[in-house]
């Protein structure tokens, strides 16, 4: 039997530490190809490049592994990998990350890491995004490897429900060992924004988006709870945004 | 009673025809403020600006209406409007558009128009995105006004289900009058990508993302059916991406 073909991408860019860790983690499991952004694309959400051109260059930065740097977004990378680089062959799995920083809860919407995974699901390919809830530049990824192996092997063995991509978050490395994995729902939380106002050398105003994460969720079945309690969180995500419960409510109450 | 405060934004940029039509459509209903991108932001999905600075400038381009051009994405515009421009006062409604082009089905994920509306919902503000399924530069918006009035008035009178934003699409203007409104689900469809390869004047390759919309949905309760049959489609959208049905399926089948 031929080895599974695993497409690796991310949103921190092809030279980041996290994608190198992910390549190292999955190369024993299958044949690997990398198509990832040529520069950091954090916070890009599900952006695609439609008003500008795209570049794609072959790069030799992972030993023995074909890799391409793309000028576009994470979602662009998956599209280019599937429809241009690979063409006649579909990957068996898309893995995205390892992201430097949390993609729990509402952050899934803003996440380039997860947009790549969701793009995989749209293309009918099992897909998973990995993130470590640690923003420090020297964040450790060592504790993730064992779980990445388990998750990837489970997906290859059992598949994923149709139209679903997994959002996997790891707690920051602590002294205590990880307690295991929890399949969760997305926590009800939001970013409370602040805009940090400054003046440029010409005296003109500019802003930095800043903000605090506010968790309104008291449940124990969500990803924030899992991370806080030293579990790996796994949230299955879908790309049908329809709020089905709201259809009948609007139909009943509105004068259509 | 004071008039409702309506925040207007879009993704085609503050100088586009569509946002002017939307301002004209809602200014009879409430007090209007505009915070919109200073340049086109189509296809930006739910991107936010986290690695770069933001600019915000007051502009006088809508008679008697305060307006601000922001260098960020549609989602940034809603955050800046709520947390910087308005600060102590929350808008009663966020309206986004009118988008030049369709945001039906899977396009909701890539849509800057809808990311602004969904950002409104995250902030707890009723929100709606409007799009016309016509990409031509001289697309007519006349047929939308009557329905924008109805929808906005219904939201202000009846509210919206919690954590829901509406994705409203209008058919292109045809000879036949619109048949009415349908509350729908998101159609099961995708973009079949193609990459148009060219050479720059220096002989280096570049690409344009191109693609065809492929509708796999045979149902009559979805937005694609509504548009094809000359109805206004209204899809309630949520920002909890959890695929709840998949949680137990993964729990049961996986070796966790």
Image (cartoon, coloured by chain):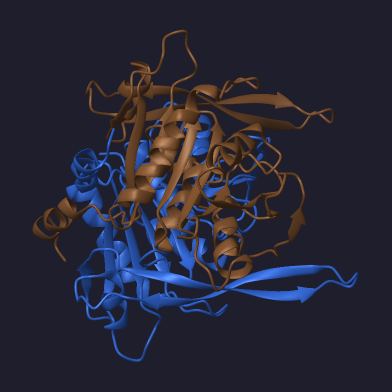
Chain colours: A blue, B brown
Residue B78 horizontal/vertical position (percent): 55, 58
Residue lying furthest front: B1
Residue lying furthest top: B175
Residue closer to the observer: A99 or B239: B239
Against B14, residue A198 (above or below) is below
Residue lying furthest left: B252
Residue in view at x 71 percent, y 75 percent? A197
Against A187, residue A254 (above or below) is above
Lateral position of residue B1 relative to residue B100, left or right? left
Residue A231 horizontal/vertical position (percent): 26, 77
Residue in view at x 20 percent, y 75 percent? A219
Residue closer to the observer: A38 or A20: A38
Residue closer to the observer: A9 or A43: A43
Q: Quadrant of the C terminus of chain A?
A: top left
Residue in view at x 19 percent, y 41 percent? A252
Residue closer to the observer: B32 or A215: B32
Locate residue A204: give its quadrant.
bottom right
Query: Can you see residue A36?
Result: no
Residue A77 horizontal/vertical position (percent): 53, 43
Q: Quadrant of the N terminus of chain A?
A: top left
Locate residue A232: give its quadrant.
bottom left
Count numbered badges in the picture.
0
Residue lying furthest bottom: A175
Query: Can you see residue A238?
Result: yes
Residue A138 horizontal/vertical position (percent): 55, 80
Residue in view at x 43 percent, y 52 percent? B118
Locate residue B14: give its quadrant.
top right
Lateral position of residue B135 relative to residue A224, left or right? right
């Amino acid at each position: 039997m031929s080895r599974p073909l695993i497409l690796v991408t991310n949103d921190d860019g092809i030279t980041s530490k996290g994608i190198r860790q992910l390549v190292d983690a999955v190369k024993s499991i299958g044949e690997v190809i990398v198509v990832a952004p040529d520069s950091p694309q954090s916070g890009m959400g599900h952006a695609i490049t439609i008003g500008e051109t795209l570049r794609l260059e072959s790069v030799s930065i992972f030993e023995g592994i074909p890799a391409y740097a793309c000028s576009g977004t994470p979602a662009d990378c998956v599209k280019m990998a599937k429809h241009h680089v690979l063409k006649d062959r579909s990957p068996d799995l898309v893995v995205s990350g390892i992201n430097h920083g949390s993609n729990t809860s509402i952050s899934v919407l803003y996440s380039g890491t997860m947009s790549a995974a969701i793009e995989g699901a749209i293309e009918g390919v099992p897909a998973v995004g990995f993130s470590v809830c640690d923003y420090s530049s020297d964040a450790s990824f060592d504790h993730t490897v064992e779980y990445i192996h388990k998750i990837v092997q489970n997906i290859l063995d059992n598949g994923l429900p149709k139209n679903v991509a997994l959002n996997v978050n790891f707690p920051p490395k602590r002294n205590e060992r990880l307690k295991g994995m929890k399949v969760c729902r997305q926590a009800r939380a939001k970013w409370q924004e602040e805009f940090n106002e400054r003046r440029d050398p010409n005296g003109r105003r500019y802003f930095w988006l800043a903000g605090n994460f506010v968790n309104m969720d008291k449940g124990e079945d969500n990803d924030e709870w899992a991370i806080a309690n030293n579990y790996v969180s796994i949230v299955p995500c879908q790309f049908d945004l329809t709020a089905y419960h709201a259809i009948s409510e609007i139909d009943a109450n509105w004068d259509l």
